[in-house]
Image (cartoon, coloured by chain):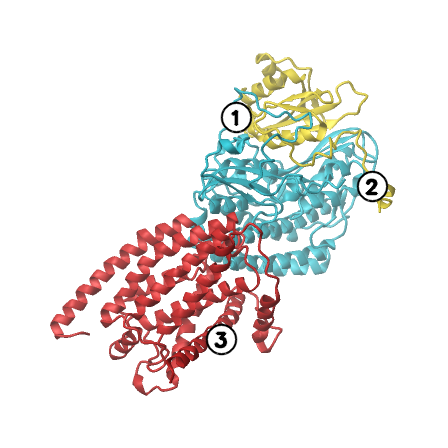
Chain colours: A yellow, B cyan, C red
Amino acid sequence: MHVNSLLEAAGVETLSVEEESKIGIVVRVVPEQVHATLLALRDGDLSFEMLLDTFGADLGAETELPIEVTYHLRSLGNGIDIRVKTCLPYDGEYHSVIDIFQSVYLPERELCEMFGLYLEDHPNPKRLLTNPELTTPLRKSVQLRSKEEIWSRY
Amino acid sequence: MEPVLKDFDLDGMSVDQFVGYDNQGWLSKEPPAGIPVPRNLRRIADDPHKMSTEHFLLNVGPSHPSTHGALREILELNGESVMSSEAHVGYLHRGIEKLCESRQYTHLAPLMDRADYAGGILPETALAHAVENLAEIEVPERAHWLRAIAAEVNRIASHFLWLGPLGLDSGAMGPFLYMVRDREILQEILESLTGQRIMFNYVRPGGVFGDMTPDAEAKLRKWLAEADRRMDEHWDILAASELFQQRVKGIGVVSKEMALSMGATGFVARASGIDWDLRRDRPYGPYSKLDFDVKIAQDGDIWSRVVVRYDEFRQSIRMLRQLLDGLPEGPFMAKLPRVLRVPKGESYGYVEGCRGEIGIHIYSDGGTKPYRVRYRPPILYHLAMADTLLPGGMIADAIVTLASFDFCFGEVDR
Amino acid sequence: MNPWATGIIHTLLLIVIMLLNGSMIIYMLRKVLGHLHLRLGPTELGPGGILQLVPDIVKLLVKEDRHPGTTDRWLYIIAPVIVFVPALMAYIAIPFSDKLIGFDVNLGVLMLFGFLTVIPLGIFAAGWGSHNKYALIGAMRAVGGAISYEIPLLLSALIPIMLAGSFSLKAITMAQTTSIWYWLPAFPAMVIFFICSIMETNQSPFDMSEAESELVSGFNTEYSAMRFGFMYLAEFSNNFIMAAIMVCLFFGGWSLPFIDPNSMGVFAPIVFIIKTYLVIFAFMFVRGTFSRYRVDQMLAFGWKKLMPIALVYSVVVAFFVKLISMKTGGGL
């Protein structure tokens, strides 16, 4: 596949490059290779010039590296979408890719705040959406309050 | 524990908001030296004693007549010029993405409404696309067309809600009421169609909730008959005025490189020269059968955005005429089980929203409730652009620039 | 009669005129702006909403007068007074008819403009004394704008003065009854005077000092109840005074075209007031139509466009006045 050869030519070691049926091409890498992957995709001849979205998902505490971070890139000229996925541990270090794509300025803050990651290399590493009392809301260990609990509060 | 208000001191001169960010352990405090910080993205100084003594901080606070919704901008001002700015958001965070994990797939639509509250049909459509993609549901043709009708009416209503306050922020109080008059008519149309004026809960995975009523169709045709004349009137009272043009031309320029690297989509990208419209380039629903143009402007300033949006008005009106005339017969909802069970996997549903590309990424584990729902807010990326655009202008420019991006804080904060 | 008694009676009469004028302008403003904005304005109380003013005044009187603890106490208290008193005093020199004038001062126009110049000082005191950054920005803008628009104002007012040969408003009006009204020979001056009066009264499109959408109410953010009522009333009477000066300078005061001015009797003040309110109507029409200027664009407009035009035109008019007076051997 073109993406595979592109990444090998740039010297990036990927875990897998697949074409999933519902969402398109997915490239899985280890966290240390994320920077090189995104750089290769942006500067290669497929020129993915837009990073549309950066988000995470908590795959559950049983998985070895539970927090899966997805980068959604798009090449406007070729009309292709590609997703780059990495996996990080709870309370792991997350290195910002803001020097490649500036669109991650706010989403990375939200990602680290929602899942509890240490945000490195970012110019403004503050929390974005929540208060300090509300810690890591999107992790699966944080439960929503049940109806009975809310009604019984007063 | 009611996480509604931030614990920052809202007095702009307080020292607390600079000394020590809320270091809860997993957000690091200092950016290390040597990292190439993007141009104009600099933090407001840690130590207020190091700031120059002639700058002062103005807190364009969460409740202000001109921040559309709850946005707190801290502007460092030198007289009237803005030296740096920082946006604080999160006043409207309701945990929509977390709440989605506890609801069944057909009950997610009201949550999506409340994310983008000005144009509610469009996020619902994105969610429906995502679920239908994953569960491989066949949606009847009439449902696609009804979704498109509701979407275009909603798009025009949302654009009115942007254009009126843009006029208000630049000083003209009159045009706002003209826009409100037209928006009322459109909301009545949507009420006849969906039963609600603003939080529709109309588009469900598998189709739509109700059929087109003769009342809605009559009202829509009546409005379409004079829609062009009304749009000319709106152009004359606001955009054709020299004073307004003088306020917005050359201000808030988003270059094409900035738009690409900041992830701008929708009308902001089109005003900067990026030729991309999801309805034309990745058509969904009936849009491949409709005849419409997409306007691209090259300058990237506020005036280009106004022009691109005015053209979107006219194209929506044109599309509505074609949609009403070509509405096919048939059922409006697919036959689905009462409790929808979706197979395991991930999928992505997208629409060309009022403000950009709304993308909903669903992780499913095979059950009746989604595992993770990610709502891609188009405006979050535009807000990051605002922080680089405001320095260098004046307060008046800052207000008008913020108004021109069409912020809807339900989307930014979710 | 005892001059003290006449003085007090005159003052009370002027205060009554000011209050009546304020109420009339408030009603007119709401109705005119309402209809421009596709709505009706007040309609409930009284026929056509005339009595809407009464609950408004009562509200302003009974509201609690709170102020933040950090205000500069003396400046905060004295600012509404500085804004209000000149607006009241300026009614003295306005000729409602040839007999109804408070005091026919020789230098009527200069005295009036002197009074009106004090008002930006009051606005600045209000902005500074409020200890509020929004108020400060609004006050600075108001002062900057007022100062830079006073020069074209005075220059354009100089032209009817030259044409009439006197500074007194009554003399200028009487001079217009013998020749044509001055708006025709001094047309650029009339336009410049109109624009500068909009600035001096802090109305749209020049209302950046109280720009409601940028600075939350500008210099009177921290004022409530009757202090705010004072400044509001002062703004309306300022409106009336600028319109009255414009009518006297350019539109012939209380006179009508073909009628002997001395025989108008009781109709003279009525005609004067109608003409003044027509000018105020024009102010309101402009107010409801246009966007607001940005501060630097407004200052550039005043200094770079209005002032040179006013200067050049006053030189041209002076030249022609001298020419005509040399030819006819006397004044116009």
The amino acid sitting under disc 2 is: Leu
Q: How many numbered markers are drawn? A: 3
Is residue B170 something one can see in this rendering?
Answer: no
**Residue annotated with mark 2:** B336
Secondary structure beneath dot 1 equals loop
Side of B67 relative to A85 (left or right): left
Left or right: residue C156 versus residue B225 is left
> Neighbour class for label 1 at 10 Å: few (<14), some, many (≥20)?
some
Q: Nearer the viewer, residue C173 or A38?
A: C173
Can you give x and y, in whole percent of width and height, for residue B358 in the image?
65, 38
Tell me, yes or no, if residue C212 can be seen here: yes
Q: Amino acid at mark 1?
A: Val
Label 2 and label 1 in one chain: yes
| Quadrant location, the C terminus of chain C | bottom left
Residue A15 percent coordinates (x, y): 69, 15
Residues tagged 3 and 2 counted as in contact (Cβ below 8 A): no
Residue B87 position (above or below residue C144)? above
Q: Amino acid at mark 3?
A: Leu
Label 3 belongs to which residue?
C20
Q: Along the polypeptide, which appears first: circle 2 or circle 1? A: 1
The residue shown at (55%, 65%) is: C226
Q: Disc 3 versus disc 2: distance between alpha carbons?
A: 72 Å
Residue under numbered circle 1: B37
Could you tell whether A49 is left or right of C178 in the image? right
State whether discs 3 and 2 lie on one chain. Answer: no
Instruction: Write the residue at 36% across / 77% down.
Output: C102
Question: Considering the image in quadrants, where does the N terminus of chain C appear?
Answer: bottom left
**Which of B144/B274 is in front?**
B274
